[in-house]
Amino acid sequence: MYKLIAMDKQINIQEALDWYIWAGVTETCSDEVCAFNKENQPIIPKTTVSAMRSSSVLAAQVPASGALVLTSFAALKNAKDICAKATSLEELRELLEKFDGCNLKNTAASTIFGDGSNKAKIMLIGEAPGADEDRIGRPFVGRCGKLLDKMFTAIELNRADCYITNVLPWRPPGNRPPTDDEIAVCLPFLKRQIELIEPDFLLLLGGIALKSVMDCADSISRTRGKWLEYSISSQKKAYVLATYHPSYLLRSTAQKSKVWTDLLRLKKKVEEIS
Ligand code: URA
């Protein structure tokens, strides 16, 4: 949620409002229009809607100058090179916070890194932060997160024993589905988290996580509940299980029993190998 509170002559109000709507703002705090940051300085949108639309979705800026627009290929290579430098989750988090190669960062309030133990045996991967996560700055803290907590408690697994993250560290405007380019440029950060944690299990929540991590074109409904394998390195593989995303369960409660079956399958395998 952004605070729209006052007016400043320097700002084209229509452009600013268009930008906020485009960015997924759904609430205002008062009748007055325009934006001030925490220091009471007027916020001028970094990018206007027309500029966003005319630029490549994957247009990336070199962090130092903020001026150079890279091609999609270069943005992806840049992300991979950056990730390769991280030798710990803390370093990776810092690098992600400085990374300016994905346009989603322009409209999100927070950069949301993974959360949980860096020695976790189970890693949960969702799609992208929602409005609550964007406001609070942690993954799965809204309605989906509450449902996930309940589901894990039901199988006697504690969220604290897991590491939880998303394919995308930034909320897409208005919760729209992420584009393939946005996924591609964020994926190196997710894959590096997997390499640094080396979990035994990956639980993929929803179709976007399945498609992104496993490069799998098959639907979530056909793939859920089946054991797959992910090569973390030449020595380490993780068991992979995909299931429906909690947001889908909030809309389609009839599918809960399928996720329950998937979670029991996960629990059984965790017990078998530990
Ligand atoms: N949905 C997700 O996929 N991730 C979150 O962090 C929250 C909701």
Image (cartoon, helix red, strand yellow):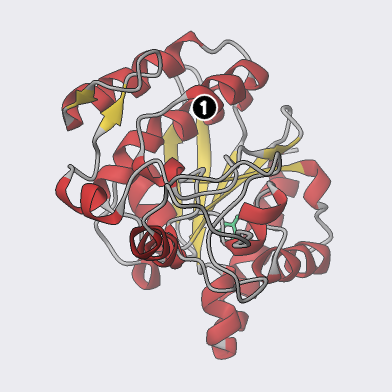
Say what amino acid the circle numbered 1 marks. Leu
Answer above or below: position of 208 versus 104.
below
Quick check: which quadrant has ligand 1? bottom right
Q: Count the marks: how many?
A: 1
Q: Residue at x 53, y 67 (%)?
A: 245
Picture coordinates of residue 216, whole percent (x, y): 29, 52
Name the quadrant of the N terminus: bottom right
Which of the 4 image quarters holds residue 213?
A: top left
Picture coordinates of residue 202, whole percent (x, y): 55, 45
**Residue closer to the observer: 230 or 31:** 31
Which of the 4 image quarters holds residue 83?
A: top left
What residue would you read off at disc 1?
Answer: 96
Answer above or below: position of 20 versus 103.
below
Q: Residue at x 40, y 13 (%)?
A: 64
Picture coordinates of residue 106, whole percent (x, y): 43, 43
Name the quadrant of the C terminus: top right
Judge: label 1 CB < 8 Å from ligand 1.
no
Which of the 4 image quarters holds residue 231?
A: top left
Q: Residue at x 35, y 70 (%)?
A: 222
Whether residue 149 is visible: yes
